[in-house]
Amino acid sequence: MRSGEVLMLGDINIDTVWPVDKLPGAGHDAYVQSVKVGLGGAVLNTAIVLDRLGQPAAMLSCMGQDLWAAQALELLRQTGVNPDYIRVRPELASGLIFLAVTPDGERTMFSFRGANTHLEPQDLPAQAFEQASILHISGYSLLEAPQRDAAWRAVELAKVNGAAISLDTGLEPALLTHAELCRLIEMTDICVTGPKEMRELYGAATPEEAIAKLQSLGVRLAAIKLGEGGSLVADQTGSVFCPAFSVEVVDTTGAGDSFSAGLLFGWTHSLSLPASAVLASALGALATTVYGAGLALLGREAVLAFLKAKRADIPPDLHAGFEEVIALLEKI
């Protein structure tokens, strides 16, 4: 596998996380004891986790030049994620997300995507793709032009330069941009999705049917996220079911993005399928133990300590993959 940057095409947002006892009905109020403000955006969350694992990552995004952008860039500079390919549009407002989180850890999002949707094909520097290992795309990038056009241009550049193409579908894109998403899936090497998405896109009734469908379309590494039910991951060597790790869930924001980071890290470091599945599952579980995403998400040291503490919980068929992950993380 190529060892260059993972290019992340998707949104950069400021997330405001509001823990509420329950969602209020129309016309009623909800009160919170604290509010957390931080970085967000699906692929940016994935990029931050990759960076904290030691894998270089860069953003292909568009931002405004307002207070939210200033705060986002200040926070981004606290990471090693490469911001050089971010397009700034002073006349636009930056992305802003309101997340209401209930005690069960479930989050309800209200999204203003703002400048994110204004990334244009000409904003993508061709040289960024020359040594890139993977282009990772958020399905939300297909919802609106010109960001949608930029995503397709990025796919062209990735193919010309031999970079793998990765997609995290998202549920809303599966509901709103069915044909575009199916077209992109057929071009991907790595696809991370869920059972609802696969049922909507292809009528797949089970995770096994979903995996089989993705593989029939040429996907080389396919993953079905099952939440508390674990995950099913497959490549040309076979398939692996990884049960979810038991944790105290406070907020599910960023869990799927962290899971994707584990698979992308496994790809760039030639991990076996069981090892990649264990790492992705552990990172996804860890993300649910903190409020918010972005800089709150955890990396190498935390996942290494977590896995060592969970050694007794690893199923026998995943023991070898577990030890493989431990050995790699200790060496980095």
Image (spheres, rainbow, N blue to C red):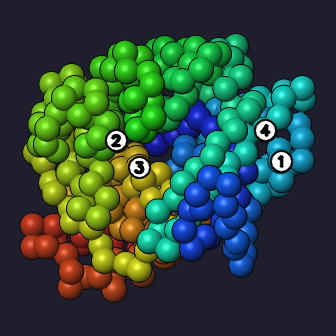
* Residue at image coords 37%, 78%: 247
Compute the Cα span from label 4 to label 1: 6 Å
- Residue type indicated by callout 2: Val
Left-right relation of 269 to 15: left
The nearer-to-camera label among 3 and 1 is 1
The nearer-to-camera label among 2 and 4 is 4
SS state under label 1 = helix
- Relative depth, front residue between 73 and 18: 18
- Residue type indicated by callout 1: Trp
Compute the Cα span from label 4 to label 3: 25 Å
Place of residue 218 in the rendered image (x, y in percent of width and height, measured from the top left): 22, 24
Residue that mark 2 sits on: 192
* Residue at image coords 34%, 41%: 192
Place of residue 19 in the rendered image (x, y in percent of width and height, measured from the top left): 62, 70
Image marks 4 and 1: residues in contact by CB distance under 8 Å:
yes
Residue that mark 3 sits on: 260
Compute the Cα span from label 2 to label 1: 29 Å
Q: Reading the chain from its start, which is encountered first: label 2 or label 4?
A: 4
* Residue at image coords 45%, 35%: 172
SS state under label 4 = loop
Quadrant for the N terminus in the image: top left
Place of residue 186 in the rendered image (x, y in percent of width and height, measured from the top left): 30, 20
- Residue type indicated by callout 4: Ser
- Residue type indicated by callout 3: Ser
Image marks 4 and 3: residues in contact by CB distance under 8 Å:
no
Residue that mark 4 sits on: 94
Disc 3 crowd, CA 10 A, few/some/many (<14, 14-19, 20+): many
Compute the Cα span from label 2 to label 4: 27 Å
